[in-house]
Amino acid sequence: MSQSLTIGCHTVPFPVIQGGMGVRVSAGNLAGHVARCGGIGIVASAGIGVGSRFYDGGNYFVAEPLALQEEIRKAYAIAPEGVVGVNCMVATTDSDTLIKAACEAGAKIIICGAGLPMNLPGLTVDYPDVALVPIVSSVKAAELIARKWSKNFKRLPDAVIVEDPETAGGHLGAKPEEIGDGSYDQMATVRGVKQMLREKFECNSPVITAGGIWDRGDLLEALEAGADGVQMGTRFVTTAECDADDAFKQAYLNCSKEDIGLIMSPAGLPGRALVKNVPAIQERERRLDTNCPLACLKKCSYRQNKERFCIINALDRAQRGDVKTGLIFCGSNAWRADRIETVQEVFDDLFELKAAAVNQ
Ligand SMILES: Cc1cc2nc3c(=O)[nH]c(=O)nc-3n(C[C@H](O)[C@H](O)[C@H](O)COP(=O)(O)O)c2cc1C
């Protein structure tokens, strides 16, 4: 397979985007190594300030853009010629600030999920080369975005990522009762988004599938079924270069299929995670009875009604290695992880690079 991927004016040799994984699971190190190997490396902006050297416990909104820019610079130090982008969650309070900070620091692609990024082209108007990519889980959402962007900004998405609520990790774009009821068809949605862009907007932007891609077989199947590329999160967690603590990676290595399930996030969205320790997270919250420390989300049931738990702190604890009371997001494939590998080994496996080198 020799299929490159072009998004806006940026081309990478391999059709792989490393999915943004918030609260420093994908920061500069992972993104830089993916970009160096020929994929698109993504720094996740959500909660990146917590756990950074800029955060003093009280200056979250100051630390966030500074930490994001530092991680983008780290990624480019690893892959000076690579394509490094930033993932932003529309549901976070400071997403607009982080999008602007990302452009300023040289992000080549902005990928937005967890909400519809209706004003994204307006925020990046001074950076016309920055490619803009929404994440959706329905043709309807993709069409809504394309219509708004075209009407208000004379711009169309440079790519669309279709995320599969049945398999992807982290926050999901479907109602909990719809997940697992057999009504959702990922590849039909990918083809539907493509057809809608071509027919209604004369737009040839690539459509990327996200969720459930683990090995070369999965990748080839997705490309065969009509995707122009894949976004992969879970497989990159158990790499040496992933920015999470070793205990986080070990939790993936130790888990079985039954440990992976759905939680309801205080953001009002379902999320896929290792669910065994969720009672311990809630118990900790009840015992300590803390108030919302940051207001990191625009809408949060913990801040508003003390429901569930503080998600940024739970994700931060897990990222630092507290896997007992931390929240470990993962995709449905986490049980397939059986060793720590390098990012290069993942690319070797996906694209049979070693075999290709021997045959040359
Ligand atoms: C630990 C973890 C954290 C994630 N955080 C984010 C995030 O901050 N923003 C986002 O848009 N998607 C997030 N995701 C989703 C991934 O970017 C990716 O699209 C998805 O997991 C793809 O499915 P896969 O994990 O089966 O490859 C996260 C996924 C994981 C596993």
Image (cartoon, grey):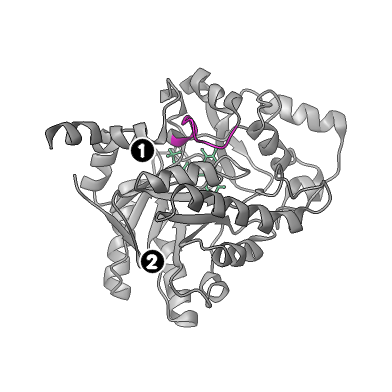
- The amino acid type found where label 1 is placed reads Ile
Left or right: residue 168 versus residue 48 is left
Relative height, residue 162 to residue 103 (above, below)? above
* Along the viewing direction, whichever of 235 and 357 lies nearer the viewer: 357
Query: At x 49% / y 41%, what residue is drawn?
Result: 30
Query: At x 48% / y 75%, what residue is drawn?
Result: 148
- The amino acid type found where label 2 is placed reads Asp
Left or right: residue 162 versus residue 178 is left
Q: Where is residue 261 in the image (x, y as percent from the top left)?
A: 54, 30
Extent of the magenta region: 236-244
- Which numbered dot is residue 158? 2
Residue identified by numbered label 1:
213
* Along the viewing direction, whichever of 184 and 11 lies nearer the viewer: 11
The dominant secondary structure in magenta is loop
Q: Is residue 101 visible?
A: yes
Locate the N terminus by quadrant: top left
Q: Where is residue 225 in the image (x, y as percent from the top left)?
A: 23, 47
- Does 237 appear in magenta? yes
Q: How crowded is mark 1: few (under 14 residues within 10 Å), some or many (20 or more)?
A: many
SS at badge 1: loop
Where on the picture, by quarter, is residue 279? top right
Query: At x 58% / y 26%, what residue is drawn?
Result: 246
